[in-house]
Image: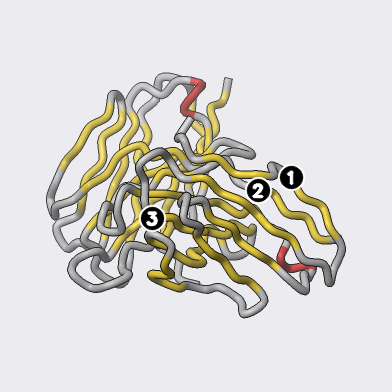
Amino acid sequence: GQQLNQSPQSMFIQEGEDVSMNCTSSSIFNTWLWYKQDPGEGPVLLIALYKAGELTSNGRLTAQFGITRKDSFLNISASIPSDVGIYFCAGQEGGQNFGNEKLTFGTGTRLTIIP
Amino acid sequence: DSGVTQTPKHLITATGQRVTLRCSPRSGDLSVYWYQQSLDQGLQFLIQYYNGEERAKGNILERFSAQQFPDLHSELNLSSLELGDSALYFCASSVVPGATEQYFGPGTRLTVT
C-alpha cells in the first residue's frame, strides 16, 4: 500500500532543542493531519490542516500545509521528555469524491531525547 | 483517551484460525475505519463503514471482512490466519464520513503463531 515519505526517519536530540520534520507525497491532498504514537498505543491527533499554506499551532507544536498540497511540515519547539514517540503525517484526499476519507500515512519519525 | 474502545487488547492464535476484533466508536461518531499497522507496511487503511454500510475499501484481504451494527459498533473478522497477519489493528471513528479528523482506539495486537 501507499505510504508518504517522511523525514527524518529518526531524531536524537537533547531536551530543550527544537525539532523539524516533513512529509512529502507524489499526489495532492486536501487535508493534512499529524499524529503522535506512543509504544503500544493508538495514534493521537495533534494538528489538522485544511488549506494550502495554512500554518496552525497547538502549544509548542506548529504545522504547515505546503503550498503545492503535496507536503507538510511539523515543528516542535523546546522539546521535553514527553515529546518522545513516533510522529506520523497523514494525508486525506477528501473533497466531493465518495469514499475518499481514508488516511494515507507517512513512514513515521521516531523522536528520542538524549539525557 | 480518544473515546474509541477496542477489544481485546491482545490476541494470540494459531495459523488457520479465525478471530474477531471489536470496536466501539466515540459517542456520536457514525463512521468507523479499520487500519492495520505492521513493521514492513506501516499504517494501512483496510475498510470504512458509515451508518452500517460499507463506504470504502482499501488494502483488505479477501480472508478479512468487517461489519458495522445498528448500535454503530464494528467488528473485523480475520480468517484462515497466516503468520504475516500478525500486526496491530486499529479502529478509528469520525463524526461523519466527510469529517477529516479521525480518532484512533488503543488497538488490538494480533500475534499468529
Q: Position of residue B68 (x, y in %)?
A: 50, 60
Three-letter amino acid code at disc 1? Answer: His
Q: Position of residue A12 (x, y in %)?
A: 52, 35
Q: Which residue is identified by label 2?
A: B108
Three-letter amino acid code at disc 3? Answer: Ser
- In whole angstroms, how far apart are the C-alphas of marks 1 and 2? 5 Å
The colouring scheme, among rainbow, by chain, secondary structure or one colour, is secondary structure
Q: In the rendered view, tell whether residue B71 sits above or below residue A26.
A: above
For discs 2 and 3, the disc positioned in front in the rendered view: 3
- In whole angstroms, how far apart are the C-alphas of marks 3 and 1? 24 Å
Q: Position of residue A51 (x, y in %)?
A: 14, 52
- Assess disc 2: are there few (<14), some (14-19) or many (≥20) residues with their C-alpha within 10 Å of its C-alpha: many
Instruction: Tell me the tag on residue B10.
Output: 1
Q: Position of residue A32 (x, y in %)?
A: 28, 53
Residue at the spot 48% in from the left edge and 43% down from the top edge:
A43
User: How many marks on residues?
Assistant: 3
Q: Tell me whether circle 2 and circle 3 mark residues in contact (CB < 8 Å).
A: no
Chain letter, disc 3 residue: B
Residue at the spot 25% in from the left edge and 64% down from the top edge:
A94
Three-letter amino acid code at disc 2? Answer: Thr
Are labels 3 and 1 assigned to the same chain? yes
Chain letter, disc 2 residue: B
- In whole angstroms, how far apart are the C-alphas of marks 2 and 3? 19 Å
- Assess disc 1: are there few (<14), some (14-19) or many (≥20) residues with their C-alpha within 10 Å of its C-alpha: few
On the question of residue A103 being in view, the answer is no
Q: Earlier in the sequence, mark 3 or mark 1?
A: 1
